[in-house]
Image (cartoon, rainbow, N blue to C red):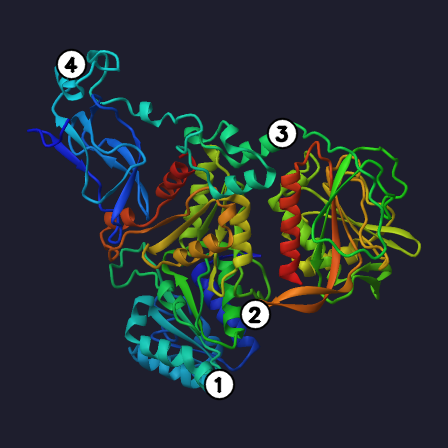
Amino acid sequence: MTGGREGRVAVTMPQLGETVAEGTVLRWLKQVGEAVADQEPLLEISTDKVDAEVPSPAAGVLAEIVVGEDETVDVGTVLAHVAPGAPSPGQRAEATGAPPVEPAAEERSPSPPSGERSSPPAGGPRHRHSPRVRRLAHDSGVDLASLTGTGPAGRVTPDDVERAARHAAPEPVPSPEAPVSVPTRAAPQRVSTAAATEPLPSLARSSAPAANRAFRTLVAEVDVPAAQWVGSSDQASVPVPGSAAAAVVAAVAGALRSHPSLLAPGAGADAGDLAVSWSTGSGTTSCLLSQAGELNVGGVAQRLLAGATAGEPPPGAGFTVSLLQDTDVLFEVAEPPPGQVATIVFGTPTRRVVVVDADGSPGIAIRQRSSVALSHDPGTVSREAALAFLRDVVRRAHSRA
Amino acid sequence: MAQLTYRDAVARGIAQEMRRDERVLLVGEDVAGAGGVFKTTVGLLDEFGPTRVVDTPISEQAILGAAMGAAMTGLRPVAEIMFSDFFAVCWDIVVNQIAKTRYMTGGQVSLPLVIKTGNGGGLRFGAQHSQSIENWAMAIPGLKVVTPSTPEDVVGLMAAAIRDDDPVIFCEHKGLYASKGEVPDGDIIDSLGTAKVRRPGRDATILSLGMMVPRALAAAEALAARGMDVEVIDVRSLVPLDTQTILGSVSRTGRLFTVEENPQLLGWGAEIASLASDECFWDLDGPIQRITTPHIPLPSADSLEDLVMPSEESIATTIEKALQS
């Protein structure tokens, strides 16, 4: 078939931006022989700058497709021809040169209901997701294509993602490996993965019953401010966390706001109390921070000072952070407390030699650093979600160091 | 605690500071004998006398020139530009002199100066007497810009502005002068650069300023009746800006709307929308939307002025549509 038949209207590749010279046909939304309304989208195209729909220049029938899907042509190239006027069986036959593949013309309305076009192909890109939804899905490892949106027009809402994250099927428990031993001075690993079936006793929870739950631990390192970690204060009878410790606690609190799937179920993104515990000469001291995600470092430091109480943290917290106080211990693998799905233990900061980027070439620097050991229940928290959370903690801690 | 009108709160705030600090004085057209054309300075002449409460000729350049000189010599003047539209006739002194003195003297000379002004529309004053000029002022480095929406905030922010060592443009909304509110007894000292959450909510954040605050609050109540729980923030201070309160709220709700009594082009909401897209992009659950006046001078006819100003109804309708699409 050739174009240019009398009465037909040519559809050309549009000029979408001054510097765009060519475009690619992504998908035909109409097939040859189908009725099309004036300005109704005929096809989707892609250029260097934008993806766009090309509307029909006239009402009638799509008479001929000249450029097929995935073909790239110059701006101005004829893509198709539309035969103006109401569709008729004869027209269709003439146009296609083949029996119509669709049901008889009289069953079709001249302008298809818009719902026909808006129903997306399976897994198609029709639904756009907001940045918040995409971030939540990414952080919690939820596949957006698998969700049915409950928002307006079927949009996936943040609540939909969080619900899916909570109900995600438990992952298979990683095969047990040799329990992690605590190395005294091993080369620090940037991020290492360890699976343990026998949790090591934690300083903070040495008296906790051995539930023997399986959990997984990811360990990273963070720069911390060269300030007091845990030490004495005029305002407290026990050693309390200083501003270096407050900085990493604030990093965790901030990251939890973006990663609510790491909180104990039911804690809620804002309502989750953050338990912080550290050991002192006479035992464990702890503090429960409510609304910790709203606080800056100074606020966290003040609340830790004001709220320090002898003993283990009370139950009911959404997440627990432990602060080690032993420079001989590189990191500690601790079991999440009962009811919680994850916990973090920060190692005592020490000065370490690190390789840094100095104007493009490697250099050596001395940094004050801590280990961050994130242990989590693999049945509730995916490895991807845990890793995303850990990275967020490190990023936030670095922005404060 | 007493009920006070917004206009009486202006006089109370100035009087509070004049009693405390004898360097504070007031200059402007009809601010002394007449008590201000909007009656915002009633009683000040009687209490503080003609050397500290000074009527001037009708010359905005003279008013601000005198105030700038007074500030340079160590006084802390409050100058009135009767209608904020008239900043246009003294803009050189504001922009090229007052705003730049600290910078161009290497910090040797600061100007502790407040320029109070009747701002905003809604009173059928027409295109030349109804503009909201916060946008003009906030574009100039060296100026601070505040707009209170309640009598209590008028007193506290006036005190904060007078105590500040740099020039502050203090926008009083003319449409709020007759509004009343509870004002605590005793001295009130607020802080520049702080926003206030007037109504907490979880579904969206609405930023508003001046007379748009009560309208946004009314719209929020209408939306609550339709099942949408929106947070209303009174921005109060554009420079400095309370980004912590504003962006914290946006991060929590995921939606941002601004209600501005100015044309959309380069309105204050554009700056905050830009900040939000920089700082809260991954928290946003939908497009940022700004509710403003159209890009036209404000009409004086009642029906037309009402049509172009954001109203309780237009605010609620816009937000409802956005939240449900």
Q: Which residue is mark 4?
A: A89
Q: Nearer the viewer, mark 3 or mark 1?
A: 3
Q: Residue B259: x, y in percent?
A: 40, 50
In the image, B296: left or right of A259? left
In the image, A163: left or right of A98? right
- Disc 1 is placed on an element classified as loop
Q: Nearer the viewer, mark 2 or mark 3?
A: 2
Q: Earlier in the sequence, mark 2 or mark 3?
A: 3
In the image, B237: left or right of A62? right
- Image mark for residue B93: none
The amino acid type, in three-letter code, at marker 4 is Pro
Q: Quadrant of residue A248?
A: bottom right
Along the viewing direction, whichever of B66 and A240 lies nearer the viewer: A240
Give how far apart the Cα atoms at labels 4 and 3 are: 52 Å
The amino acid type, in three-letter code, at marker 1 is Gly
Mark 1 vs mark 4: tell me if same chain.
Answer: no
Q: Nearer the viewer, mark 1 or mark 2?
A: 2
